[in-house]
Amino acid sequence: MNALTPITAHTGRAVALRRDQVDTDQIIPASFCKRLTKSGYADALFAGWRKDPGFVLDRPEHAGATVLVAARNFGTGSSREHAVWALRDGGFAAVIASSFGDIFRRNAWRNGLLAVELPEEAVAALADAAEADPGFTVTIDLAGLTVTAGGDRWEFTANERQRRLLMEGLDEIAVTLAEDEAITAYESARHDWLPAAGPRTTPARSRARL
Amino acid sequence: MSAPRTLIDKVWDGHVVRRRADDPDLIYIDLHLVHEASSPQAFDGLRGTGRRVRRPDLTLALEDHNVPTDSLTIADAMGREQVETLRRNCAEHGITVYSLGDGRQGIVHVVAPERGLVQPGTTVVCGDSHTSTHGAFGALAFGVGTGDVEHVLATQTMPLARPRTMAVEFAGALPPDVTAKDLMLAVIAQIGANGANGHVIEYRGAAIEGLTMEGRMTLCNLSVEAGARAGMIAPDEVTYRYLKGRPDAPSGDAWDRAERHWRTLPTDEGARFDRTVTVDAASLAPFVTWGTNPGQAVPVDSAVPDPEAFADEADRAAAERALAYMDLAPGTPMRSIAVDTVFIGSCTNGRIEDLRAAADVMRGRKVADGVTALVVPGSMAVRRAAEEEGLHEVFAAAGAQWRLSGCSMCLGMNADRLVGPRRCASTSNRNYEGRQGDRARTHLVSPAVAAATAVTGRLTPPAGLR
Ligand code: SF4
């Protein structure tokens, strides 16, 4: 029941945000993280920077762009998954950068936002092209692990498990729950002196529904 | 004999639930810390799928991000709703929660260690990047997103690719006035805010052995500001002394068995790290940040750097942007920069030793005119300990505000936030644009520098008062 829509590729127009170290506090300020939902964050995306009327994402020629071309260490900082939800709600399906914050990258793939790492020269070339032509289109192919745009083609690597989950539309928790036997066996061999935050309970086992 | 292994390898290998050639390892999580801001959607996910929390006994919840520090009532409706949601979720699933008003409440990364819950060789996760703090005990501890919070609640495990290992070796002893905070700001300035991406760091060397647990927690806390997944320090006598007798630490015979295991954890002679970085601890001075990421830091006795001096074009552009936001000109001596706010607290520097260091500087002195100084203990237990030592009286006499515990001005989510273009010397961990409030400008500093700065109204090392 929790399966996601499989994602195998994405094609869309690119917009460049040429800033290093875009932290998740910029992607979504903490004051928006009081909400209890996983969606409805479009208004929060880059809320601080959007106060500048010339902010690149608000330029009319970039309306409808779905591929964000960033720079180095995109998504560094706070672990807030809201950053991914805000990008997705803001219409983005992929972010291409030369490096990512580790937690952000993991959060992104889990939510079907393709966080694709390419060499700095490739990212710069994509940013140049997106700035020169707002109609510049990029295709990310998960099966072949390639990015193609304007006649160029680059390969990228991905966490194999996250890629597979996404391409098959699988719920990661369900996949892990199928390992219940191994988890239970591990638990029964744990040291008895290990810490507990509350009274010891027997493991509550959820059914694995794939 | 088996090949020599690092501390990181040993903890990892001890937590593999299932290993397969074509898949990441499934890692068991010994302790899951939960707070109100990153968990509501995870509990919703469980409800939507009819799943249960597998190990409520290995889960502890805290209220910290949204709580006020001057009252026990959350005025903001959304913040209150988020906290109440956490309480309902914990009640539904049988999870222990230390709520606002409870004597055990505080910042998640301060409370778990002071309870004795974080032990050497364990795995700890939390929906919060500064979970790296707990590596100070020789635990493998890292922050995760809300989706992983849900995953750990349901399975008590995480599928994880084995991280690369990095040794940060400190050569020499720390000079006076140089704290764990300065040490780490210097490391980040040296390797960059993404210098340790994809790695787990082990901090090594005499300077580390000489640190208290509080100092080690500060160091490991900031690992994530260097981009690391986690930071770790091998357990030793300092660790055992800190843990012994804490409410949730083992006791009696269980302690002996635990300690026997802990003593096997330190990195073996000859074990290899994927990367090694050496830092000359003896040459360091108190550090302060001038920019908008924690890597943009210099010794307090130096000046704001000139962007033109950066060889890399992107670094230059970042420095220019940062200086524009910070409203600083290249060449300005750091010590001439005036602040209007001083924040002493957070999971980085809100522990008893941090408050002692600040009080030592403020004792018999006054906060400068026009400066608002907040002292926010990291937990209610820290607050009580400080009051037993009379530190609150030192702060009050100096004119600083003595608050209840919480994340406070670290993140601009609760009532303690800066409004307008204020400038703050802060013992927290992130000097990002807008982190402490919409247009707030943050200089990261150690508690001693924060206190000296409160007294003079300008960025000042404690030596500047003597
Ligand atoms: S004190 Fe700051 S960094 Fe630490 S948990 Fe709270 S908000 Fe996060």
Image (cartoon, rainbow, N blue to C red):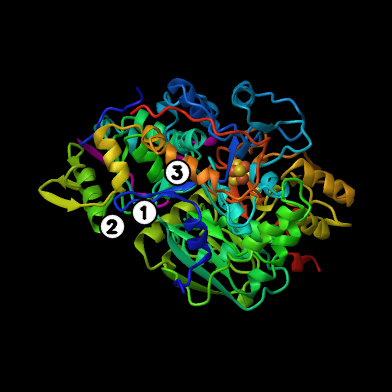
Say which residue label 1 marks.
A72
* Mark 2 C-beta closer than 8 Å to ligand 1: no
Vertical side of B449 occupied by B441: above or below: above
Amino acid type at mark 2: Glu
Q: What secondary structure is marked by label 1?
A: loop
Amino acid type at mark 1: Arg
- Seen at 67% across and 32% down, the residue is B97
Disc 1 and disc 2 in contact, CB within 8 angstroms? yes
Foreground of the two, B11 or B102: B11
Foreground of the two, A63 or A202: A202
Q: Position of residue B259 (x, y in %)?
A: 68, 61
Q: Position of residue A55 (x, y in %)?
A: 37, 38
Query: What chain letter is assigned to the residue under label 2?
Result: A
Q: Position of residue A179 (x, y in %)?
A: 40, 39
- Seen at 76% across and 50% down, the residue is B246
Query: Residue B393: in sight, yes or no?
Result: no
* Left or right: A193 as drawn, with respect to B47: right
- Seen at 40% across and 60% down, the residue is B315
Separation of marks 1 and 2 at Cα, in angstroms: 8 Å
Marked residue nearer the N-terminal end (1 or 2): 1
Query: What chain letter is assigned to the residue under label 1?
Result: A
How dense is the environment of label 3, judged by Cα within 10 Å: few (below 14), some, or many (20 and up)? many
Q: What secondary structure is marked by label 2?
A: helix
Say which residue label 3 marks.
B158
Of badges 2 and 3, the one in the foreground is 3
Foreground of the two, A68 or B404: B404
Vertical side of B191 occupied by B26: above or below: above
* Left or right: B436 as drawn, with respect to B99: left
